[in-house]
Image (cartoon, grey):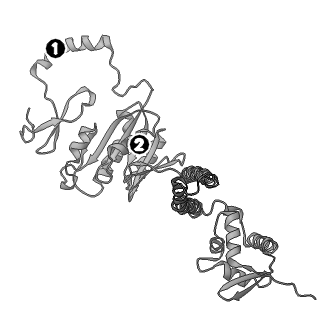
Amino acid sequence: MKCPQCESDQVRKNGRPNGHQRYLCKACRKHFFERLSPQSFSRKCTETLLSEAIPKGIAPATTTESGGISILLLDAENLKLKVNTEQFLAGLCDYPLQVKIAFANWKNPSIGKLDAELYDRGYELIHVPGGANSADGKMIAFGAAILYRYRDVRQVFVCSSDGLLNHLCNQLQNQGLTVFRVRRQNSVLSVENPRTGDSHHYSCEREMKIPSFEELANQVAELLKAEHKSIDERIARFSSVAELFQERRTVAFNSTTGPAAALSESAQNEFTPVLEASLATVAVNQNVAEQNLREIIPGLNSNAIESLDVFKTILVEIIEAAKIELKEDAIPVTKIKKDFLAKYQTQADLVVKNFLGKNSSLIKYLQSESGVFEVKLIGQEHQVAIAKKSST
C-alpha cells in the first residue's frame, strides 16, 4: 500500500474510526483511509455485507457494559504522560478509559519518536499545523463536539497546562460531563475536578501518588512508633542479659584457683564494658528517635497554644513546678526548655518564633515580660524567676 499524497510505501496503521482502517504516512505525516476495491462497489457485495450486518445488529463503538466510558485528551506538545502516570489517571475515573487522543504537530523535530510511542500505547494521533496554540485550538474544537463522536462518554481528562483549555473544561461541564483538569508544575502532576474541588497529586520523579498531609503524618507516626517499639524490645533483651550476667557473677566456684574461676574473672572483665556500652548505645538511639519525632512534627501538639497569654501561663506553671522540684527560686532556662519539650513535644523557641517572628527567642520573650519574669545572667547561664509584685 502506498500513500496517495507522496506515494511512499512507508505507512502504518493509525486507528480504525467507524470501522474504517486509517493509515499514517511516515514520510509526509498525512493520514488516509484504505481505498475500497472495485468489488466493494458492486451491488451483490453491498447486499451481502448488509445481510450479514443487519441480523447481528450494529452497536455503537463506544458502548460498554458499565454504561459509559472515559476519554483522555492530551496536548502532547505541552505535557508528557508516562505509562504509570496514565495508569494513575485511569484509577481516578469511574468508567473505563477507552479512548485516548493526542494532539500535536508531529512534524516538529522536538517531538522525536513520541508519536510512535503514543501510537503503540493505543492513542489516536491528530496532526495540527505549526504555530502557537495550534494544538490547543484543535483540542478545544474537537472536545467541544465530543458527545457527537462518543455518545457514551461520561468523564474527560483534559491534559494540558495551558490556560486556554479552561474554556474547553467549562464547555464540557455545561454538557453534563465530569472533567478532570490535568496540569504539571515542575515534577508534580495535579489532577483537579473543577466541579467538586477535589484534587489529587502525583510525583513524576517517584512515579507514585503524593499522599495528603494527614496521611503523611500518620505514616511518620506509625514508622516512629514501630521504631520505638523495636528499641524497647532491644532494651528489654539487653536488660535481661545484663541481669543474667549479674546473677552469673554471684555464683561462687568451689575452687578459687582452678581454671573455671580464672575464666569467669576474665569473662567479667571483658564482657562488662561491652554490655554497658551496648546498653548506653541503645538508650542513646531511643533518645535520638524521640528527638526525631519532635523535629519532624513539631507543631502537632503545639496547636493547643493559641496565644502568647496561654504560652505565658504555661511558662509560669513550668517555673512553679521546677521551683518545687529544685527547691530554688531561679530556674535555668535550659530546664524550662527541657520541661516544655517533654510536655508539649515542641521547642519553646519555635512557639515564640511563630508568634513574634524568626528573630525572636524564648530568652528575649522572657526579658520583654519583665512584669512577670525576672531574668538574670549567672555566669554563662540565664536563670528565670517569677517577678515579685511590688506592694502598693
Q: Is residue 120 left or right of residue 149?
A: left
Tell me the quadrant of the picture where the N terminus can be found: top left
In percent of width and height, residue 319 lies at 77, 74
Residue 88, disc: 2
For the residues bearing labels 2 and 1, Cβ distance under 8 angstroms:
no
In-front residue for pair 80/280: 280
Neighbour class for label 2 at 10 Å: few (<14), some, many (≥20)?
some
Q: Is residue 259 left or right of residue 74?
A: right
- Residue 256: quadrant of the picture: bottom right
Seen at 41% across and 30% down, the residue is 152
In percent of width and height, residue 261 lies at 55, 55
- Which one is in front in this view, the residue at disc 2 or the one at disc 1? 2
In percent of width and height, residue 322 lies at 77, 73
In-front residue for pair 268/303: 268
In-front residue for pair 16/253: 253
Q: Amino acid at mark 2?
A: Phe
